[in-house]
Amino acid sequence: MHCQPEYKGPVYIWSKNKQSCLLCDEASDSLLALCSACQDELPWLGAQCSVCALPLPAVGLTCGQCLQHPRAFQRVIVPWRYDFPLDSLISRFKHQEQWPFGRLMAELFAQFLNFRFDEGLPRPDCLLPVPLSRRRLRQRGFNQADMLARWLGQPLHLTVEPDLLRRVQDTPAQQGLNAQARRRNLSQAFALTASTSVAGRHLALVDDVLTTGATAQALAQLLMGAGARQVDVYCLARTPGAEHRD
């Protein structure tokens, strides 16, 4: 007597699955849903500020803003410029709930970070997604930074602590504000979970796009003030200036 029904059709084998490129729709030549040609065409970030990763004309420089106003975070680690087609992928993930695009970018980012760790970049103790306000979370239905942090945590072998940071003030949108206005907007906007200690820990904030760095600065100041040893920022893309939204 057979315990299972007999089936003579094709069997789905994950290890032999052929992915299609999410950008050009051609068959991918890798295990990712992105072909090598499209991966090479992504707007990889070259020379950048050694602290905030602002695109600069030469390697090894620090931008004027970071020299005049030292940051609370140690460094920003980011693979791409906020430019086509990456800006479209982020927008579709963030605003249209097309999560495969977010998962793809997280997989590529994890490869990039593992390469940097092998080169000597200090590994953090954990990943902290940048929190959303309750209103924005209700509107969007998910926190894109939280999803990115969770997708990064497993391949990087890092823990994710999504509840360590809270957004306690529902501040107005950052779009269209200059750096000074963004800093005022974010003053007292975040808080730590009372039961969680960050003393002596190396922490990495995770977000999708860094613009002026005002959000990262506010969170890093909070964490360093609570005794953190170091705060880094991990994000998918860096804008060339303040014309895009954090």
Image (cartoon, rainbow, N blue to C red):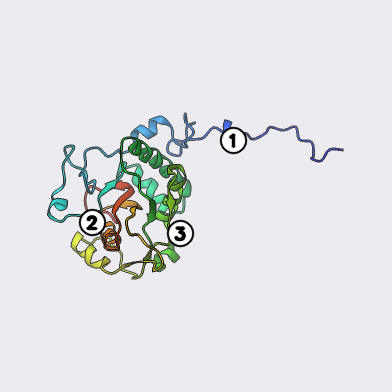
Give the secondary structure at mark 1.
Answer: helix
Q: Relative to residue 199, is residue 31 drawn left or right?
A: right
Name the residue rendered at 15%, 47% in the picture: 63
Name the residue rendered at 87%, 38% in the picture: 1
Amino acid marked by disc 3: Phe
Q: How far separated are the C-alphas under marks 3 and 1?
A: 28 Å
The image shows residue 137 at horizontal and vertical percentages of 43, 64
In this rendering, which labeled residue sits more in front, label 1 or label 2? 2
Q: How far separated are the C-alphas under marks 1 and 2?
A: 45 Å
Amino acid marked by disc 1: Trp
Q: Residues within 10 Å of mark 2 (few under 14, many from 20)?
A: some
Q: Residues within 10 Å of mark 3 (few under 14, many from 20)?
A: some
Q: Relative to residue 60, is residue 12 drawn left or right?
A: right
The image shows residue 221 at horizontal and vertical percentages of 26, 61
Asked whether the viewer can see residue 113, the reply is yes
Q: Relative to residue 102, is residue 67 drawn left or right?
A: left
List the single residue furthest toward the front: 200
| Residue 244 versus residue 22 in the image, above or below | below
Q: Earlier in the sequence, mark 1 or mark 2?
A: 1
Q: How many marks?
A: 3
Please name the residue that numbered disc 3 is placed on.
142
Give the secondary structure at mark 2.
Answer: loop
In this rendering, which labeled residue sits more in front, label 3 or label 2? 2
Q: Earlier in the sequence, mark 3 or mark 1?
A: 1
Give the secondary structure at mark 3.
Answer: loop
Q: How far separated are the C-alphas under marks 3 and 2?
A: 28 Å
The image shows residue 156 at horizontal and vertical percentages of 42, 43
Instruction: Identify which residue, 80 or 83, lies in the foreground.
Output: 80
Please name the residue that numbered disc 2 is placed on.
72
Please say if the residues under marks 3 and 1 sit with CB atoms less than 8 Å apart.
no
